[in-house]
Amino acid sequence: MPTSPPPNSRSGQGPRIAMVAALVPVLVALALWAFAWPAARTAPRDLPLGVAGPAAAAEPVAQRLEQREGAFEVHRYADEAAARSAIEGRTVYGAVVATPKGPKLLTATAASPVVAQLLEQAVREQAPGGTQVPTVDVVPAPTADPRGSALGSSVLPLAIAGVAAGALVTLRGLRGLRAAGALVLAAGLVGVIAAALTHSWLGVLTGNWWAEAGVLGLSTLAVSATVAGIAALLGPAGIGVGALLMVLLGNPFSGVTSAPRLLPEPIGAIGQLLPPGAGGTLLRSVSFFDGAQAAAPASTLGIWTALGLTGVLLGARRGRRAPASEEPSAVRDAAPAG
């Protein structure tokens, strides 16, 4: 005869159903906030922009830009050559050069096609009526990816790959040095494969091949080590925590599809402190700007990697101590009384 489930099992289903029903809308609301809000509030916020030329001609240009309070962080340069050098060094996103014929705009679509388009619009609006504003792309984006769409699309797959590697290491029961070795090996392979696809096949990256592979691998390792480290300390639930941090927040906060200075504050700054944002910034520097301004994002990825691997090793040590501490009580329970 079929047996009915115990009454307690049925009564316990109610709270679980209620928890799931409440949790799903919360996650949807969080995802919409994380992805839609920054995109809907895109605007320049202290965007570094150069103004070059003789002081008498450049000062009115700088004043007009500064009138847009909070939009631009104006850097002054003596001439066009200095402004070009600042763009190539990633100090500014572009520059307005004051010339006898009117303003001239220098941009860098490799830094951000969205910012380049925004600067063109802003400078043309402030130029005297009927004045043509010539534009020079100092560091152009690759011809295979003029809008930066492919580069922006690379952030999410790398984050997902990192979460998957961290989850697999955890669920397969790897611990300590074995887990760390598996994470490093997986990230290295991801870096090589990703560079082969984005550089060799698609042509959307144009820098040193091995440097790009290293950045792609390090970006993946920072995510996977963090996920595995949290899981080693908190248990399997740590996989979900790491995934939420890296995918739900790290991806939309990265600013790779636009620019960190276009996101609402402090979202742009937070995004650069997470592996997806730091990885995207480092990849641009290595691929298009000969490594300019690479130290900060590389350090961020290194810190996340170190913290994650430390968590993996600490979790393994704690796991070894727990059975040892339980052994005496187990022996006492098994010993005969009297």
Image (cartoon, grey):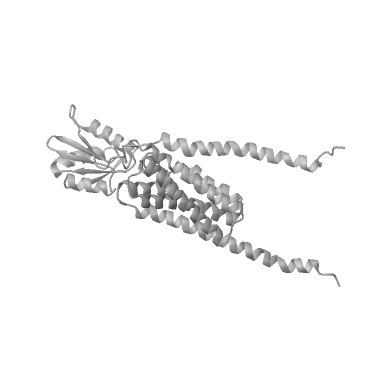
Q: Residue furthest top?
A: 130
Q: Where is residue 83 in the image (x, y as percent from the top left)?
A: 21, 46
- Decide if residue 29 is on the left or right side of residue 297: right
Name of the residue lying farthest toward the bottom: 338
Extreme-left residue of the structure: 100
| In the displayed structure image, the side of residue 146 where residue 246 appears, left or right | right
Left or right, 289 with reference to 21: left
Side of 157 where 143 appears, left or right = left
Query: Is residue 250 visible from the viewing direction of this image?
Result: no
Q: How many marks?
A: 0
User: Can residue 175 be seen from the camera position used here?
Assistant: yes
The percent coordinates of residue 257 (x first, y second) are 39, 39
Q: Is residue 37 above or below residue 335?
A: above
Image point (74%, 42%), residue name: 12
Q: In which quarter of the image is residue 115?
A: top left
Above or below for 129 versus 67: above
Q: Which x, y percent locates residue 9?
A: 77, 42
Q: In which quarter of the image is the N terminus?
A: top right
Query: Which residue lies at the image location 59% right of the left edge and 53% below the top edge?
Result: 170
Which of 314 and 67 lies nearest the eye of the viewer? 314
Could you tell me residue 134's position as x and y percent?
20, 34
Quadrant in the picture for the C terminus: bottom right
